Amino acid sequence: MKKILYFSFFCSLSLPLAAFGQTHAHASFFPPNSLRFPVDGKSINQGLSQEATVSAIEAVKLAYDDYIRQDGREFTFDLLWKSEEVNAIHFASRSRVLISIFGGIARHPLMSADGFKFVLCHELGHSFGGFPQKSKEDFASSEGQSDYYASLKCMRKVLAQEDNAKFLRAVQIPAVLKKACEQSHTSREDQLICMRSTLAGLNLGKILATLKAGIPTPDLSTPDLSVVQTTNLSYPTVQCRLDTFFQGALCTKPVHESLYYADEMKGTCNVSEGFTKGVRPACWFKPAYSGM
Ligand SMILES: [Zn+2]
């Protein structure tokens, strides 16, 4: 039997594993949480409607259509709308990928359409994010790498289909974000996508902070300055994750440059190449090639 892996946005126990067999390993995107948003609960008018959720899934699928076809594996997005669990899970075998999305995550009162697309991008990051892998045996990128991939590649593909100038005219953009995106990117469209993608990451950072009492709300101005001695393949702190979303958006490597398990540098921005912005934060990533 093939080994089955799954990686989730939030921990969950009711897993649709039947189609994949019984042998599996798992890790959740967020720490285990007891948040529940039932379909008939009071939060029904908050978060995303079912229609908006389906529309967001379709937008991500459309952006990845060619990419998935070239990949060769069978990809399935399965929306379990009635589930109250706050979760999205990535299952993978050599030939198939299943991304299951529980309705409770879309009904989180703080969830925006862009934040939800970012969640899907993180799950796709487990399939396309390259080095580092979750473990040597896994067909999946680590959590921090999937976060990085989400803004480095996926949200750029997704947002390339949209009118980002119009979207951004209607929202507040933190000065630190505007400045950083304008300094990193030269094309106006790239600058706008950088801002919008990071705002989606900020939305998720705020949601992550609701999972457990005592988690400070992350902010773009207060990066996690800790330095790991070895790469953290599991879940970085909420602030560190927001920093990763932000840096992925600032990296100027071309969106079409793919990432690989065997190459930590391809498609990414690295200090050893002279990049000071857009690199994976030291709060979870320890480069093998320091260039020193
Ligand atoms: Zn994950």
Image (cartoon, rainbow, N blue to C red):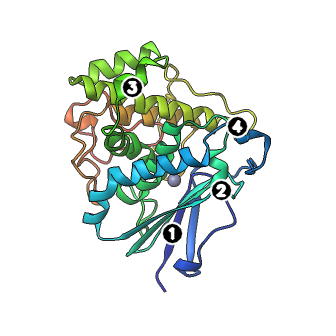
Q: Nearer the N terminus, badge 2 or badge 3?
A: 2
In percent of the image, x 66 and y 28: which residue is there? 216
Q: Nearer the N terminus, badge 4 or badge 2?
A: 2
The response on whether ligand 1 sits within 8 Å of label 3 is no
Q: CA distance from mark 2 to mark 3?
A: 29 Å
Q: Nearer the viewer, residue 266 or 114?
A: 114
Dot 4 corresponds to which residue? Answer: 45
Dot 2 corresponds to which residue? Answer: 11
In percent of the image, x 49 and y 34: which residue is there? 201
Residue 267, visible in the rendered structure: yes
The relative height of residue 181 versus residue 274 in the rendered view (above or below) is: above
Q: Nearer the N terminus, badge 2 or badge 1?
A: 1
Residue 230, visible in the rendered structure: no
Name the spot of residue 40 as percent of width and height, x first: 77, 49
Amino acid marked by disc 4: Asn
Horizontal side of 266 relative to 63 (left or right) equals left
Horizontal side of 274 relative to 100 (left or right) equals left
Q: Nearer the viewer, residue 151 or 56?
A: 56
Q: CA distance from mark 2 to mark 1?
A: 14 Å
Amino acid marked by disc 3: Met
The relative height of residue 155 versus residue 31 in the rendered view (above or below) is: above
The relative height of residue 73 versus residue 244 in the rendered view (above or below) is: below
